[in-house]
Amino acid sequence: MTTTATPAPKKDKKFKGVVVINRESCKGCAFCVEFCPLGALDLEKDYNAKGYHPPYLAKPELCNGCDTCGLYCPDFSIFGYREKLEQAA
Amino acid sequence: MSAPVKENPVNKYLRTERMPSIWCPGCGIGTTVNCFTRALDASGFDLDKVAIVSGIGCTGRVAGYLKLDSFHTTHGRAIPFATGLQLANPDLKVVVYSGDGDLTAIGGNHLVHAARRNADMLVVCVNNFTYGMTGGQVTPTTFRPAIASTTPYGAYEETFNLPRLADSCGAVYVARWTAYHVRQLAKSMGEALNKKGFRFIEIIAPCPTLYLRRNKLGDGLDEMKFYREKSVIKHGADTREVNLDFRQEITVGKFVDRERPTLEEAMEKQMTKTLGSKYVPYQSPGKKPAWS
Amino acid sequence: MSNANSTGVLSGNHYLDGDHACAEGAIAGGCRFAAGYPITPSTEVVERIASRFPLVGGRFQQFEDELGASIALLGGVWGGAKAMTVTSGPGFSLMMEHLGYAAITETPCVYIDVQRPGPSTGLPTAPAQGDMMQARFGSHGDFRVIALCPNSPQECFDLTFRAFNLAEEYRVPVLVMLDEVVGHMTEKVVIPTPDKLQVTPRRYTKKKPGEGFKLYEAPAGSLVPEMVKAGDGYRIHVTGLTHDERGYPAMNVPTQEKMQARLMDKLLNNVDQIVSWEEKNLAGAEVVVVSYGITSRVAEKAIQAARDQGVKVGSFRLITAWPFPEKQIKALAGKVKAFVVPELNLGQMALEVERVVGGKTKTVSVPHPGGTVHNPEVITKAILEAVR
């Protein structure tokens, strides 16, 4: 299952950060949460089918789509990207 | 409001039908693979011409997960397989991706000789200080006095300083990073991919299940935080000065970047010099596809 | 089939030793990549290769050991070359793992073993035939290979040439099992013109990438999958793990059963096309001498001596030791009083003869620990005793 979280953009931003999480393939290592440079992620309280706590975008307004989470993820279960606001509208 | 669901950019490099991987939660191997795909992405290479060769072990499984021509060989023999593959098909860019036990113990002889002869390949060595797949035995990189299943009272052998080993044998590119240094690692892999000759990147990575747990060092995340805290970037450091020790500072960075004729170039040059017009150069089967 | 590449073929009459003839057979057979490590008495093969390859567009690499050499050639094959390595007993032992790897990955390749007495370092630079069972069973697990036994420098050329064709036909490792005498004896070798040398090209798939090619799916009516090479866009995965038709690891019993059955059957179902032997005076024979390699030439004298004494002795010379010409030996079993099996080991192929004969006829092993060849009189004596 794939879920997306989209923040409400700040008015002065030209893009917004988007994080895509495949919560079922996550093994809950929390690398993404720890190393998100903006502290935007946290682990869910819920479990996925394999019994791990996957991440979620806890503070969407902080995410700038830098994809550091994507680089860290050992299970290829999360990535971030930037969406131009003109295109996203 | 929901954004259009994009494909994970790493997916085009993966055999997604083989996911999830066998790697444990908190294992660093997947993170290094992630960095590798970013480096490939940035390289602009024709991926059809990139071949990946692994030995045996947890890191040895990398070949099976990457959607490239991929060869999961025998224990310790990825490097000679890669040498044969590259010499017989010099149009390929060959990457060896394996672990510390595979490359430096059972495969140690091939490592030193491939570096000496400057065989054209990038060797990525994921060093997690243990044989993971067989249950956590001591390797040539296990620090004293770490506990391994075959050193239950603590390791007592001197370890390899892998960058020094590769450097002294003649590798043209030598770097060390940890799984924490994802951006630097991806950049370094990209640099190394674009060089010719024997290139060696050591990546320190957590093995939470067998190395960390047995040594009461926490989980994968704890180890990654340890890397963040204890790593010092020293580009160009003398590789004699970058030895690692148990729970001590980790020197990372690009240590060696030099030029030397590759095995293939040296071979061609010598044959041409001695044989002149009698020399019939090898015709690479890679010039055109077999189906054409 | 296509004609041999004329740049490589030294057509004409030569005076060559067996090792050098092997090298020429390989070149004529299309081999353009070889990996080696020095070991007596096989080194002359790679020395010849090292000197000849740069003149014919081939690449030779000496490795740090036989472990490296015996897998480097497999890398060469997947890169698109026809490839081989060469060794002798101790090196052959080190190569065993990759014989198994070549078998499970169905990599067409050629290994030459110039046998010397063992075990271990044994008696270098002396003849033996003690690796025959190792050729068949030396790597762990069940697998099949083809093993050819030349008894002259001419046959070293012919059989090495054929080894490359067989490797491509069945995608198996093919072993050329010399002994030191055949490797080092010098005789006339006639190398045919390229138009007389029919080469089996690599059986590449006609499917392009994206057209549903599966690495280990044999085409209808065949048990041998088609090949591809790295770099052509198929994104293959080759593994020594038990794998499915895509080449992906599948560690379960049904996959193991299916894979192993095909690996066995692709040779067993084609035994009639593979086996070859030379027979003499089998009609009405009371005793048949089964021999191979240099021992077959020593046995000729013994057979003649026995025939001079009125014994009806026939000769059955193994050219393929593996697969063993089981059907042919079985057919003789009911007709003859005994099989006499001289060999430069303590009774290896004799075991296979005995197994195939199944008690119908006596099997007499004429063992020799190696280091030299049999005294023909010992074989004659065994023939005379067997017929009593």
Image (cartoon, coloured by chain):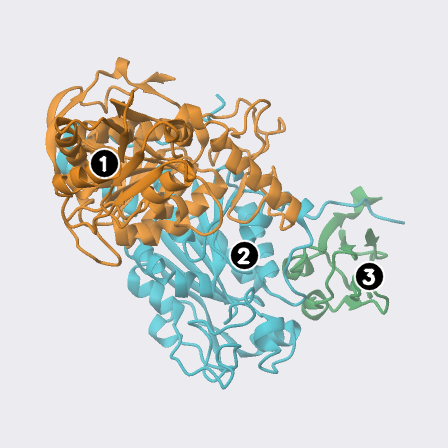
Chain B: its colour in the image is: cyan
Judge from the rendering whether residue C149 lies leftward or rightward of residue C183; answer left or right: right
* Identity of the residue drawn at 38% across and 72% down: B160
- From this viewpoint, which residue is outermost toward the top? C195
Q: Which residue is mark 3?
A: A48
Chain displayed in green: A
Q: Note whether A9 is above or below B288 in the view shown.
A: below
Residue visible at 49% across and 43% down in the picture: C104
Q: Colour of chain C?
A: orange
Name the image quarter holding residue B186.
bottom right
Task: State the residue position of label 2.
Answer: B186
Identity, as a three-letter code, of the amino acid under mark 1: Gly
Pick whichever, C6 or A26, lies toward us.
C6
Q: Looking at the picture, how far across and down is residue B281, in whole percent?
A: 26, 31
Chain identity of mark 1: C
Task: Please say if C213 is above or below B205.
Answer: above
Residue at mark 3 to residue at mark 2: CA–CA distance: 30 Å
Which numbered disc, 2 or 1, marks the residue closer to the eye? 1
Instruction: In the rendered structure, find residue C293 and report the number of the disc placed on it.
Output: 1
Which structural element holds mark 1? Answer: loop
Whether callout 3 and callout 1 share a subunit is answered no
Distance of label 2 from label 1 (alpha carbons): 57 Å
Q: Marks 3 and 2: same chain?
A: no
